Image (cartoon, coloured by chain):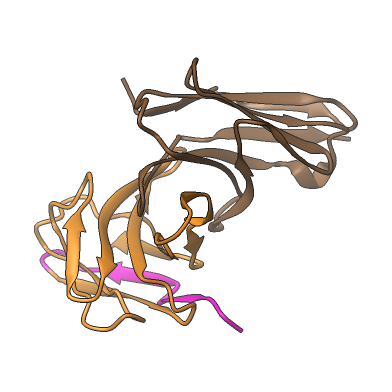
Amino acid sequence: RKEVEQDPGPFNVPEGATVAFNCTYSNSASQSFFWYRQDCRKEPKLLMSVYSSGNEDGRFTAQLNRASQYISLLIRDSKLSDSATYLCVVNIFAGKSTFGDGTTLTVKP
Amino acid sequence: DGGITQSPKYLFRKEGQNVTLSCEQNLNHDAMYWYRQDPGQGLRLIYYSQIVNDFQKGDIAEGYSVSREKKESFPLTVTSAQKNPTAFYLCASSNPSGQLAKNIQYFGAGTRLSVL
């Protein structure tokens, strides 16, 4: 079993749709969590950190459930520019991260 | 501008040849990392370094070597022992001290390595 697993995707949605991605992690000692965005043939860039209390940044909402070892990302009112691969990232300890394989989102007109 | 610079952007390796990928950062970060990404897959950790003159193997270190003689620099050598080196190589840095929530990794633009 992989340490970090994501929905395989791909997700193809129309503009304006709401889409949710899920991620599970296996190490209960994991300490911090992030969502990164990666555009085609580019480097990953931080989208948002994920906190137990849940956090929101505009159209994006991230949730963490430590008991279920589950992270989610919700995108509301999808835009064409949201098309990318979304990577779930888990820090086991300071300085070492494990990346999920990513979920690809395509937003269509 | 602060950031991470990787060079070259594209690199071709002949059979039996060692090649070195450059990674330089001016973010004053203590930790640096090398990842490999194959098409349609996530990032796999090759090596990481949390401090100058010290580095640790990641999940797929075989066929690779690194050095960390300066805080700013973390070059990766792909040796001839790496039989399938074609991939996208990404270098990252972070400041792991302090709150873990701030241990965010920042990436360079990557190097695409192909075998001739």
Q: Which quadrant of the figure has residue B79?
A: bottom left
Magenta-span inclusion, residue B12? yes
| Residue B8 screen position, x and y as percent | 40, 77
User: Observer-nearest residue: A67 or B15?
Assistant: A67
Residue B57 in sight in this render? yes
Q: Is residue A13 above or below residue A97?
A: above
**Image quadrant where one finds the C terminus of chain A:** top right
**Image quadrant where one finds the N terminus of chain A:** top left
Q: Which quadrant of the figure has residue A49?
A: top right
Q: Residue at x 53, y 76 (%)?
A: B3
Read off the magenta span: B1-16
| Residue B73 screen position, x and y as percent | 32, 80
Q: Is residue A64 above or below residue A34?
A: above
User: Observer-nearest residue: B83 or B28?
Assistant: B28
Q: Which quadrant of the figure has residue A56?
A: top right
Pick out the residue farthest to the top.
Answer: A68
Q: Is residue B6 above or below residue B94?
A: below
Q: Residue at x 32, y 80 (%)?
A: B71
Q: Residue at x 82, y 42 (%)?
A: A80
Chain letter for the orange part = B
Magenta-span inclusion, residue A81? no
User: Observer-nearest residue: A104 or B112?
Assistant: A104
| Residue B51 screen position, x and y as percent | 26, 70
Residue B116 in sight in this render? no
| A39 lies left or right of B101 | right
Q: Residue at x 35, y 66 (%)?
A: B31
| B8 lies left or right of B84 | right
| B74 lies left or right of A21 | left
Total tally of numbered discs in the picture = 0
| Residue A106 screen position, x and y as percent | 72, 35
Chain letter for the brown part = A
